Image (cartoon, rainbow, N blue to C red):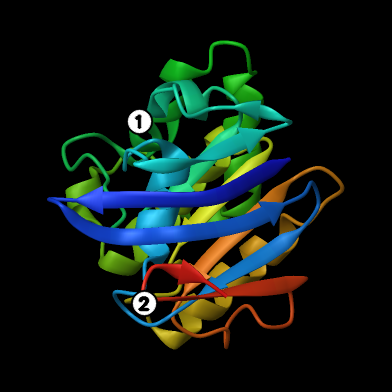
Amino acid sequence: MIEVKNIEVLIKSIEILRGVSLTLAPGEMIGLVGRNGAGKTTTIRALMGLAPLKDGEILVDGRSIDHLKPHQRAALGIGYLPEDRRLVPLLTVEENILVPSWAMPQIDHKKRLAFAYDLLPEIATMRDRKALQLSGGQQKLVALARAIMAGTKVLLLDEPFEGVAPALSQRVSEVIGALRGEKLAVLIAQSEVNHAAKMLDRSYSIERGTSI
């Protein structure tokens, strides 16, 4: 489904990625593992169109998406969970989850929302609360639900277990594990594979901006 071919990314003239390559097929759960600053977040941001490529290519179903803007990539069925959640503070939980639907008029948003609430019933009970009223862990669950709303084909999860209590990390693991299916592809970026080790099909290591 996704092919990343030797991508290079510069940020403020500093080379962050140099020759990163990976593949992600339907039904796979893949890890992207590396220390802080290794290039995990930049790789995922490049996949979402948030970090422009200097060189290389990103293909989805054999077609280049390098020219597509982030909302156009979301419309392809790509969901994204940023490490820092990036919720809109004054929007409600439900409004934050529905944000990707603005770029995806082709999907049944009510059905997709019901699916997210079925996976995460704990956030359904707080659907009318403002995002700024939530704890960091609760915000992480809402951001995961938002990624699920868009991610009908691909989920890009950047440090989904970072900054949350151990019990909540286990809950996030359960939700991600429940998403395994024949078609959905999941890329999980993390510093260690502890939480996701049992569910990953394989992993890539990234070090100093280069995949290994």
In the rendered structure, the answer to whether residue 17 lies left or right of residue 201 reads: left
- The tag on residue 67 is none
Image quadrant where residue 28 sits: bottom right
The answer to which quarter of the image holds residue 87 is: top left
Q: Quadrant of the N terminus?
A: top right
Above/below status of 159 relative to 78: below
Q: Residue at x 66, y 45 (%)?
A: 3
Q: Position of residue 175 (x, y in %)?
A: 63, 62
Q: Is residue 60 above or below residue 203?
A: above
Find numbered disc 1 in the image and state the secondary structure of the residue it sits on: helix
Q: Amino acid at mark 1?
A: Glu
Residue 164: give its label: 2
Residue 205, image x, y percentages: 55, 77
Q: In this figure, which residue is indicated by the disc labeled 1?
A: 95
N-terminal of the two: label 2 or label 1?
1
Q: Which quadrant holds residue 30?
A: bottom right
